[in-house]
Image (spheres, helix red, strand yellow):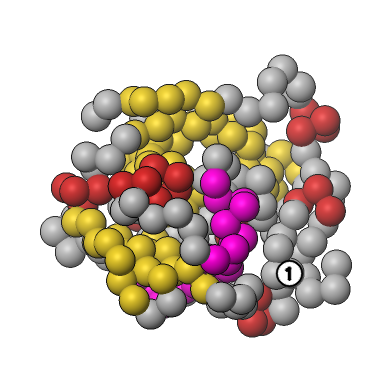
Amino acid sequence: MAVTRGFKGRGSAEGPARVPPGQHLVDDFPVLSAGPTPRVSLDDWSFTLKVGPRPVMKWSWAEFNTLPITKMTRDIHCVTTWSKLDTAWEGVLVDDIFAAANLPPPTPYILAHSFDGYSTNVPVADLSGKAMVAIRYEGKPLERDHGGPARLLVPHLYFWKSAKWINGLQFTERDEAGFWELRGYHMYGDPWREQRYSGD
């Protein structure tokens, strides 16, 4: 597996300077999901890029793994108030997915979709240069409980935006609410502004 680029976090700041308001540090990696953990075999896995309802590119697992692989180390923050520092991921940058499809973003908004029916909205500006579809964690294939075979990683937003078991990205004309957003969670979800719920 080729590694094309490496990204590090905010630098040498430690502890509280890296923890958003209302968060606490954990050493483990808590498992939280909206429903049962799906079992997705690599033979059945696929990833589709859509513009509205129209598919413009689809990859199998083998095809997806031929795209440029990047390493990224980032702090992550869950809306349930835990934060974990220096998590190490490998995957395909969202920018490289767009490039492989020869598709400049046609709208400012995206819905991420998952095999279990989950969805979440993310502005394109928060994906370009900042996010990946992760397939490895701490040097190992991503475990099912943490979203394997692949999950979206948008580390600067609350972790519900990093959709587990991802199977596609869909460009939308407007900012459409996903699963948790329809149930009262914030449409954007910035940990540093404590945007947990609608109205925060």
Q: Position of residue 99 (x, y in %)?
A: 37, 46
Element type where label 1 sits in the image: loop
Whether residue 51 appears in magenta in the rendering, the answer is no
Q: Tell how many labels.
A: 1
| Residue nearest the observer in this picture, 88 or 47 | 47
Quadrant housing the N terminus: top left
Q: Residue at x 31, y 53 (%)?
A: 101
Q: Assess disc 1: are there few (<14), some (14-19) or many (≥20) residues with their C-alpha within 10 Å of its C-alpha.
A: some
Q: Disc 1 marks which amino acid?
A: His
Q: Position of residue 24 (x, y in %)?
A: 76, 44
Q: Which residues are magenta?
A: 107-128
Quadrant in the picture for residue 194: bottom right
Residue 161 vs 3, above or below: the answer is below
| Residue nearest the observer in this picture, 105 or 132 | 105
Per the image, the residue denoted by label 1 is: 186
Residue occupying the far left of the picture: 43
Residue 147 visible in image: no
Residue 16 visible in image: yes
Quadrant housing the C terminus: bottom right
Q: Position of residue 75 (x, y in %)?
A: 63, 37
Q: Is residue 30 left or right of residue 196?
A: left
Q: Is residue 107 left or right of residue 187?
A: left
Whether residue 120 appears in magenta in the rendering, the answer is yes
